Image (cartoon, grey):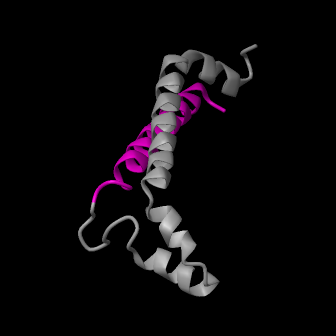
Amino acid sequence: MPLMLTKITVVLFALVLLLLGILLILVPWVNLSGVGDWGDNYLLALVVENTGLPIVKTIVASAWFRGAVTGLGVFNILLAFWEIANFRKSVEMLEGTGT
């Protein structure tokens, strides 16, 4: 793989991690217009209706579950910063020249 393509791959991977982390931090807590609250959406209602398990909605709407999703977002952001800090090492490993 050409060196420039490898560098772009690492940058895009870090960018995806960063954006996914921001999304996972914000979405559980923000009421999106048109979509509704985190615990009151069409997909969740469909899952509850098809499985017959109303506890799923209770669990997903709980603050504990929202906090766990937010924790995954923080983890993604930390991974993005780790990728940025170790950019040269990541490029070398993708190129096959690293140890």
Quadrant where the N terminus lies?
A: top right
Task: Please report the residue visible at 56 percent of the width from the left and 72 percent of the height from the top.
Answer: 55
- Compared with 4, 62 (above or below) is below
Based on the displayed image, in which of its 4 quarters is residue 19 positioned? Answer: top left
Residue 89 vertical placement versus 74 (above, below): above
Q: Position of residue 10 (x, y in %)?
A: 54, 31
Report whether 97 appears left or right of 10: right
* Residue 12 in sight here: no
Q: Residue furthest top?
A: 99
The x and y percentages for residue 86 are 55, 18
In terms of depth relative to the viewer, which is nearer, 61 or 33? 61
Query: Residue 92 vs residue 19: left or right?
Result: right
**Quarter placement of the C terminus:** top right
Q: Main secondary structure of the magenta part?
A: helix
Q: Which residues are magenta?
A: 1-30
> Looking at the image, which is closer to me, 39 or 73?
39
Residue drawn at the location 30% of the way across and 71% of the way down: 36
- The residue positioned 59% from the left and 25% from the top of the image is 3
Does the magenta-highlighted stretch encompass residue 9? Answer: yes
Q: Which image quadrant is residue 56 in?
A: bottom right
User: In the image, is 81 to the left or to the right of 29?
Assistant: right
18 or 73, nearer to the observer: 73
